[in-house]
Image (cartoon, grey):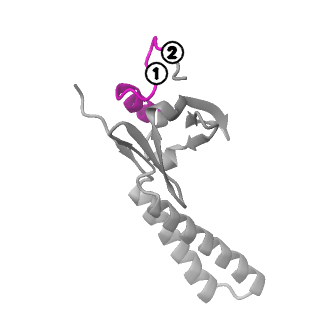
Amino acid sequence: MSTQQTMWAPPTAGVIGTAAAGVLLAVGAVTLVTDLPGRILIGLAAVGLLVFAQMSWWARPKLAISGDALVYRGWWRERTIGRSDIALIRITEFRRIGRRVRLLEIDTTDDRLLVLSRWDLGTDPVQVLDALTETGFAPGPGRAPLR
């Protein structure tokens, strides 16, 4: 039996880097930019990056296996999803700006769709699907989707 990861979150270095970029933009808006429209635009970008970094930090871990349920933590609230509440878990893959993008989709029985990207999970969504399959949350090869 292999030891699987049971929590996934945005990468710590990425969140810290986003916050640092926000601080640098804020400092630049206050000290370097002399025209008012430029200060406003760069200041808004700085605030946006800082808010995004803070909210990404608060939502850690974004997805976790907790006993017989999945715990999804969003920016505003935490949601516990039991095995019986999961209708389907799958990977959606498409090309975007010349590269392949994968998303983990968790469809619940109450018609809610949770979409998690590589940023949200801190790893490839396929690895998360493998861990969810091994723990019985997603159907494995030869198994019908959960309904």
User: Which quarter shows the C terminus?
Assistant: top right
Foreground of the two, 17 or 60 = 60
* 78 part of magenta stretch: no
Q: Amino acid at mark 1?
A: Pro
3D distance between C-alphas at marks 2 and 1:
6 Å
Q: What's the residue at 30%, 35% (across, down)?
A: 4
Can you say whether 138 is above or below 68 in the image? above
Q: Secondary structure at mark 2?
A: loop
Q: Amino acid at mark 2?
A: Ala
Which residue position is annotated with label 1? 139
Quarter in which the N terminus is drawn: top left
Mark 2 lies on residue: 144
Viewer-proximal residue among 124 and 21: 124
Which residue is depicted at the point 77% across and 81% down? Answer: 37
Neighbourhood count class around disc 2 (C-alpha, 10 Å): few under 14, some 14–19, many 20 upward: few
Could you tell me residue 10's position as x and y percent?
45, 53
Check contact, mark 2 vs mark 1: CB within 8 A.
yes
Q: Residues within 10 Å of mark 1 (few under 14, many from 20)?
A: some
> Quick one: label 2 or label 1, which is nearer the N terminus?
1
The residue depicted at 51 percent of the width and 23 percent of the height is 146
Please report the bounds of the magenta region as a residue range.
Answer: 126-144
In this rendering, position of residue 140 left or right of residue 90: left
Residue placed furthest toward the right? 37
Vertical arrangement, residue 76 with respect to residue 100, above or below: below
Q: Please, is residue 60 above or below residue 84 in the view?
A: below
x then y, percent, for residue 9: 42, 51
Q: Secondary structure at mark 1?
A: loop
**Where in the figure is residue 97, as x and y percent of width and height?**
67, 41
| Numbered label attached to residue 130 | none
Asked if 17 appears above or below 108 in the picture, the reply is below
Q: Is residue 139 magenta?
A: yes
